[in-house]
Amino acid sequence: MNQPLHTQQLNPYAIQLCTLGRWIAQRQWLPAGSGLFSVRTSEHSALFTAAGKDKNELSPADLVAYDWAKPKEQDTATAIHQFLYQLKPQHKVVLQIHGLQATVFSRLIKADQHLFVGYELQQLVAATAAQRSCCPLAILDPQSTELTLQELHQRFERETLAYAFLIRGHGLYVWGDCIDSAKRHLETWQFLIACELERIKASALLN
Amino acid sequence: MNQPLHTQQLNPYAIQLCTLGRWIAQRQWLPAGSGLFSVRTSEHSALFTAAGKDKNELSPADLVAYDWAKPKEQDTATAIHQFLYQLKPQHKVVLQIHGLQATVFSRLIKADQHLFVGYELQQLVAATAAQRSCCPLAILDPQSTELTLQELHQRFERETLAYAFLIRGHGLYVWGDCIDSAKRHLETWQFLIACELERIKASALLN
Amino acid sequence: MNQPLHTQQLNPYAIQLCTLGRWIAQRQWLPAGSGLFSVRTSEHSALFTAAGKDKNELSPADLVAYDWAKPKEQDTATAIHQFLYQLKPQHKVVLQIHGLQATVFSRLIKADQHLFVGYELQQLVAATAAQRSCCPLAILDPQSTELTLQELHQRFERETLAYAFLIRGHGLYVWGDCIDSAKRHLETWQFLIACELERIKASALLN
Amino acid sequence: MNQPLHTQQLNPYAIQLCTLGRWIAQRQWLPAGSGLFSVRTSEHSALFTAAGKDKNELSPADLVAYDWAKPKEQDTATAIHQFLYQLKPQHKVVLQIHGLQATVFSRLIKADQHLFVGYELQQLVAATAAQRSCCPLAILDPQSTELTLQELHQRFERETLAYAFLIRGHGLYVWGDCIDSAKRHLETWQFLIACELERIKASALLN
């Protein structure tokens, strides 16, 4: 009764992030407690899921506040989340997952991006009008945190990313300006990647 | 208590369509709120699901009435539903879905139709006696609304469709003379398409 | 209150068959109400599921008694069930399903049987000691009821079947001496067929 | 009320093992009651799941105590569990499962091990620092119990195994120093194996 109350338990964003986390875990896109989710709480802070936490059991008390005005040691995934929040104030939610198809696709494609063409659902992730007909998904090689952030910086300078990128064998990152759009981007990219992986395999057999 | 009552909430067709919608969403054939369902309510009107609505949470209050005696701006999917209702009075329910196998299959097959042969379950979608042994599935390219309707008109002139067609990368359309038959046609076509995709791939490897 | 009581509702075999039917339907091996299940009730009678019934909603009242001492018009699937009951008194339960992998496998293999070798779980369906190391699965072409029964007769004369056979594109039949053994044979064969389909495809790619 | 109380019902390890068993069964990695789980209860004893038990319905009363100070007839799977407990006191939980991908993978790879490279999640099963970048999965051929134990002995002499090995067509074995680590190793290996199987197939098509 008299336990200290986690402030996150009253935070509606924290509650929504946990609900989304459990939904994602049920899709089995987070094997063995992998994946990292966060939600922005101010210009320079966000709530993060704890490392290794089984997202099927995620509750607001499992979220950890992080303030980048007070820097501390970070792993690469956390640094990427922070980078995305600092890049644009509209970035409110960031999700990293380890779905099977996204993982295999990221290893299979050798180029530094893949162009998605011919799917109606591209319109749900298109960040520009042109991406509705030809939508790029950036693919990076895993590197040190510093080199990964440099590479991301260059990618975003060069073009508008369609709310997602892959790191080969290291997961799919998506983001959005609210919980619902991040979820929509995640579900759409998982669908597009799974379709494209299957289409590429079948096309190689038949053509 | 005193909230205005949605008339759809008393409409048994609306309730059945929502039940079917939630069943379909649980199969994951509607990624990111995609898909469009409708049920005829009169000679010239139908109830439609709202665009982008997550069908896992579909309730009668989410359906939108549309009367084609009072034309208004339409997207292609809505126009196709209207076309099917106007084609034959027996068409009572129309469903569009974005299943992974149907999407990949529609991209893989280059011809304007595919013939299904050798599956016992063809009998569940055969619109003619001949289709029990050889059942065609029409495949259209995505085009403007106007050209799509012209193309559909020509297809229906040429032959009886087996309660379904595909638009490449833009989903599977099925219909029926009641909720149950539309559901049966959907489930059967999803099964036949998934089998045929797998059979084609495996045959290409072994033969 | 005063509705006539279905005698099947008091039949423990009927209740067990319905429980098994719902379990199978949840695995999605019975698309669009397909499949046929039966349980023996005497030397010359059995209870059958009604044609087209969605097995997710199966209850004892949906079962139909059939007595082969009083012959009537039958479809091929029902005739096959009767054949199996008449073949041996130990045959107490017969199941026909339309799983995706079994359907594709039956179309892919051109021979009249396939030999399963190297799976530990073969021991769960082996009808003889030799089948533990090399277990045949018979595959028949779809034919008229009469020719199908003749063919089955010859197959059973020639060898002991491992509690199952396939009819190309027309489903997997399994049987057992009780509900539990029929279920175990079904689940094991579905697993073995799915493994073998995947193994054959992958081997063709790599070797 | 006065039924004899199973001592296992009060054993927290037994309760945890049953909870894990039901979780694994729901993933469909244990077809037809296959698989064997155990938890160490002392230096020379463990609780085992009963042969053929459907793990969806596992309860502590279904576990069987086995003490290797009092040797008795064993099947190969049980002997392997005992071997692992005797090898190192840190081995507290052993799991054997029959997942489809693990079974196919074990048959497809002809070498006596497979090296996993390039997956971030390797870090969750790495037993040494080097395995984070290159993680071997040992694959044994099925043999008599005696030869299998000799072979395992040699493998463990030669190198540190990454908490898992495969026996071709006879399942995946994983272990850990507690229920949670055994579960994490199982889930991670299932993911890595499923990714690698898909990656190998797709690579063979495209390269």
Image: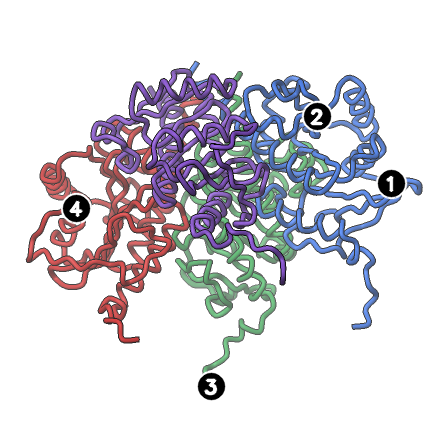
Chain colours: A green, B blue, C purple, D red
Q: Can residue D193 be spotted in the picture?
A: no
Residue marked by disc 4 = D80
The residue at the point 28 percent across, 36 percent down is D115
Q: For the residue labelled by badge 4, is the local secondary structure a helix, a strand or a loop?
A: helix
Which of discs 1 and 2 lies nearer the camera? The answer is: 2
- On the same chain, marks 4 and 3? The answer is no
Residue marked by disc 1 = B73
Q: Which amino acid does label 3 sit on?
A: Asn
Q: The C terminus of chain B is located in which quarter?
A: top left
Q: Distance between the residues labelled 1 and 2?
A: 32 Å
- Name the quadrant containing residue B191: top right
Q: Which amino acid does label 4 sit on?
A: Ile
Q: How far apart are marks 4 and 3 (CA)?
A: 50 Å
Q: Which chain carries label 4?
A: D
Q: Position of residue B71 (x, y in %)?
A: 91, 40
Residue furthest to the bottom in view is: A2
Which of discs 2 and 3 lies nearer the camera? The answer is: 2
